[in-house]
């Protein structure tokens, strides 16, 4: 929840926010990325404190129908809100002047499914009203747990984004200059012209080769072979029967698939190719 203008995150129910407004910068340093790397805000992370407040109010409404909040049925929530709301003409010190109106403007769908609708200003008023009602009508430890869960999910979303950026940069570096050793695999110089890079290791007792090469149609692919079939083909991937394709959830392209493949298995190093 990176916000350039905020010095700190102000929690609603917790005594102290478990993360700061510069959580992205903290994680960039923690993951060892260069300080100048910018991470795009994940879609699931609120853009600012106003969005986080609305999201928190929606989380409270979503949880309010559960037994742990004391409301056993959705119908009990509007009843509680109506009893809590100021009477007409009542001057309640904390009331900004719209609590009663917002309580009765909230639709059953908004209350039951935790999705506040309306123009931005109306959403803010609804959210503030929901949070004020919750503060008075729901146990503090439950509200703290809801907000803690929100912060945990925000931090995890940033962690996932930073980890993905680190992985992307590692794959790019791998493609530019494949290292001699990678996760227990050893790179070797393949003899066939179509092979761009090849690694060898022993996987579950079987010597194997994983390589990026061009097919006869010119497509760049990443596949694994048994070292025996690789050697029998004269290190020609067009002739050798491949064992399995390299797959990746880390990125697109043959080098991303090879990199992911090398990280996947707990292998033992192989000193020399099987003849």
Image (tube, rainbow, N blue to C red):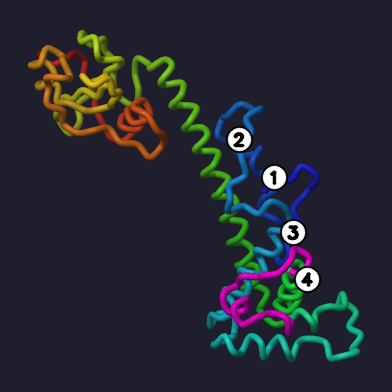
What is the C-alpha distance between the residues marked 4 and 3?
Answer: 11 Å
What is the C-alpha distance between the residues marked 1 and 2?
Answer: 12 Å
Residue closest to the eye, 207 or 215: 215
Direction from residue 99 to residue 44 in the image, left or right: left
Give the mark nearest the N terminus, 4 or 2: 2
Label 3 neighbourhood size at 10 Å, few (<14), some (14-19), many (20+)? Answer: some
**Secondary structure predominantly adopted by residues drawn in magenta:** helix
Label 4 neighbourhood size at 10 Å, few (<14), some (14-19), many (20+)? Answer: some
Label 2 neighbourhood size at 10 Å, few (<14), some (14-19), many (20+)? Answer: many
Residue range in magenta is 103-122
**Which residue is under mark 4?**
125
Give the mark nearest the N terminus, 4 or 1: 1
Which of the two discs, 1 and 2, sits closer to the camera?
A: 1
Residue closest to the eye, 116 or 142: 116
Q: Are marks 3 and 1 in contact (CB under 8 Å)?
A: no
**Which residue is under mark 1?**
2
Which of the two discs, 4 and 1, sits closer to the camera?
A: 4
Give the mark nearest the N terminus, 3 or 1: 1
Direction from residue 137 to residue 209 in the image, left or right: left
Give the mark nearest the N terminus, 1 or 2: 1
Give the mark nearest the N terminus, 3 or 2: 2
**Which residue is under mark 3?**
50
Query: Where 270 falls versus 160 (above or below)?
Result: above
Direction from residue 108 to residue 119 in the image, left or right: right
Which element carries disc 3, helix, strand or loop?
A: helix
User: Residue 68 location, x and y as percent?
Assistant: 55, 80
Residue 28 bears which disc, if any? Answer: 2
């Amino acid at each position: 929840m990176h916000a350039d203008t905020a010095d700190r995150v102000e929690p609603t129910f917790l005594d102290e926010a478990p993360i700061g407004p510069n959580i992205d910068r903290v994680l960039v340093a923690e993951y060892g990325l260069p300080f100048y790397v910018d991470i795009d805000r994940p879609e699931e992370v609120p853009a600012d404190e106003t969005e986080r407040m609305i999201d928190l109010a929606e989380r409270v409404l979503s949880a309010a129908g559960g037994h742990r909040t004391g409301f056993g049925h959705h119908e009990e929530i509007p009843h509680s809100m109506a009893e809590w709301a100021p009477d007409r003409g009542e001057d309640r010190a904390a009331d900004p002047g719209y609590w009663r109106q917002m309580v009765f403007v909230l639709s059953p769908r908004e209350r039951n499914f935790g999705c506040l609708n309306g123009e931005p200003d109306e959403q803010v008023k609804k959210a503030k009203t929901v949070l004020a009602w919750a503060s008075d009508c729901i146990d503090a430890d439950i509200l703290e747990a809801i907000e803690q869960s929100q912060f945990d999910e925000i931090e995890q979303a940033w962690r996932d984004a930073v980890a993905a950026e680190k992985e992307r940069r590692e794959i790019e570096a791998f493609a530019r200059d494949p290292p001699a050793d990678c996760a227990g695999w050893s790179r070797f110089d393949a003899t066939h012209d179509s092979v761009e890079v090849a690694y060898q290791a022993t996987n579950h007792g079987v010597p194997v080769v994983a390589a990026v090469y061009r097919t006869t149609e010119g497509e760049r692919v990443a596949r694994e072979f048994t070292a025996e079939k690789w050697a029998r083909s004269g290190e020609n991937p067009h002739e050798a029967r491949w064992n399995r394709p390299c797959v990746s959830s880390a990125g697109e392209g043959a080098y991303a698939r090879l990199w992911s493949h090398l990280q996947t298995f707990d292998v033992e190093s192989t000193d020399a190719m099987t003849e």
